[in-house]
Image (cartoon, rainbow, N blue to C red):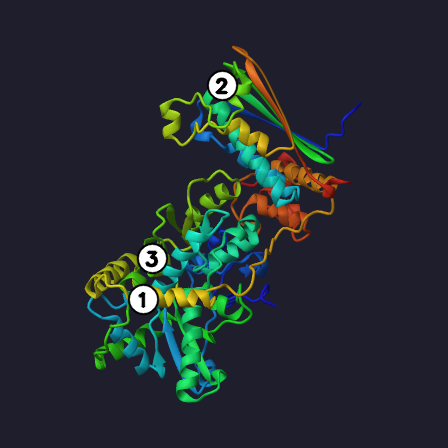
Amino acid sequence: MGETFHTIVTDPARCNGCVACMRACPTDAIRTRSGLAEVRGLACIDCGACVEACPRDALRAVTSTPADLARFKVKVAIPSLALYGQFGPDVRPGQVLHALKQVGFDRAYDVSWMCEMVGSATDAYLSECQGPWPKISTTCPAIVRLIQIRYPELLSHLLPIETPRELAAKLHRRRLASELGLHPGEIGIFFITQCAAIMNSIVAPVGLDRSYMDGAIAISELYGPLRKALKEHPGSEFDDAVSARGLGWAMGAGEVSSLRNSATIRIRGVGEVLEVFDRLESGTFQGIDFIEAYTCSGGCLGGHLTITPRHVAQRSLERIARRLGEGQQVKEEKVRSLLREHFFDLHDEIDARPVQPLAGNLRQAIAVKQEKDAMLQALPGKDCGACGAPDCAAFVDDIARGEATFNQCVFVRLRELEEESPADQGGET
Amino acid sequence: MSEDILFRQTFAIRGGDFERGGDAASAIKVILKQLGFPNDVVRRLSIANFEAEMNVIMYAREAELEICVLPDAVRIVLADRGQGIPDIEWAMQEGNSTATPEMRARGFGAGLGLPNIRRNSDEFEVTSTVGVGTTLRYTVFAGPRAQV
């Protein structure tokens, strides 16, 4: 079920089959054979690199619609912290929450305090954890999927703590249901998201049976209406509960800054992530206890469903955080009691989803490898993408799987043509 | 007795080539994954190969690293030409190292190289002649999957 669902779809009317998305994809999940980009479900991690790369806006993230919202009696928005950075340094988080209530939500709840809380819980967990080290954050769903499909050896490194957004939704649903005397199912909780990966983590969750949220709406979709609402009814809601410490999570450095353990690193952007994970997997990356990782360079502010350029948004958010002050929102006793209740625990184990099917036995695997190596030798190695695969190695994989044929390579075909036609063709004048 | 070598490949390693340090270990990791070896086998060999490769880069002039895939194991033979190890027993003790301050600054020289290779392999053998070079042979058993 979850394996095949994906948030990113191709619009055939806009896609002209160019190779921009295919080359941008970090997991080789796209093929452009029939003149159309096709995302392969099993290999896709919903990172959004293709959406970003497409010059024709042909790849889109499927998010919730107004009809999805209408199903619920009470509509709740939990905005990504990235939303606070979209409207400049002078718009306060409280005003953004107020504006969300002008554009169709009955309630809007801040998630920064839960980030601070999860930070404290992570700190407590790390101080008692026996390894394996380092632990890797599960906040970015694209990172979790990447580990599932490509680095199964690192699954045991994933921090077994639920994300702030899910925990906030869990808590608010419970509270609201009892406050309003409603069945929890009558409350619709929607994440205002900066990326497709979170939408996918709601529809096809990992580490829990069912998401505590009901859907997600893109920041880019609400940006216009929210701007208008902020202008017309600026509101004066208090930011009392907004945590400056929590806001750091949007910039991809919130987790590490909330830890007492200083043997931490943060990595952002797919290139950086692959480099570090490769070394971790080989066991040659030592002395680090915690890794905060995001597939977007710039952390969540760099999500492809945002509007404001990430450096500008970061500057705004930094100023907003400074104005809020360094004060701690979360009481340590509260965190300790929730820890005892296992409130933060990830519900299920995260399983491996390797893409490459293993060959039947070692001899067969070696035969296949040698065949592939020979084919690769015979290809031009230009990684042009004209065959519909992102590079020559992926093309050879496709041939081995029976999904492509050798002469789909334009250079191979050209060579064949030259060999077929004798040199006397130069007669044209 | 003839050995059933299913696959063999050799990598050249140059002493002092920190720039490409780890390349052979990475390439072997890719091969082992392609061949479908279990994660545990891949990880143990990757650690051992990286240590062995860095030993050459830090201490020797040059070396060949050969990987042999056998029906039930993966064997590595790494023969270098270099200064050799005068006291193997000493070098096999954790914490003993002749690394220079510069090497230590790069994060090596904890004196764990050889013991770490032994720990991550099922068979381990080291022979060395001072002034000529060192040869490491280590094997990781690959379990029932390899029974063809």
Element on which disc 2 rests: strand
Q: Nearer the viewer, residue A31 or A286?
A: A286
Which chain does the residue under circle 3 lie in? A
Three-letter residue code for mark 2: Ala
Labelled disc at residue B60:
2
Q: State whether residue A75 is above or below residue A332.
A: below
From the viewer's perspective, is the residue at label 2 or at label 3 nearer?
3
List x then y, in percent, for residue A348: 55, 64
Three-letter residue code for mark 3: Gly
Residue tagged by mark 3?
A254
Three-letter residue code for mark 1: Lys
Sequence-wise first label, 1 or 3? 3
Q: Nearer the viewer, residue A93 or A167?
A: A167
Distance (Cα) linking label 1 and label 3: 18 Å
Which chain does the residue under circle 1 lie in? A
Which chain does the residue under circle 2 lie in? B
Q: State whether residue A165 is above or below residue A312.
A: below
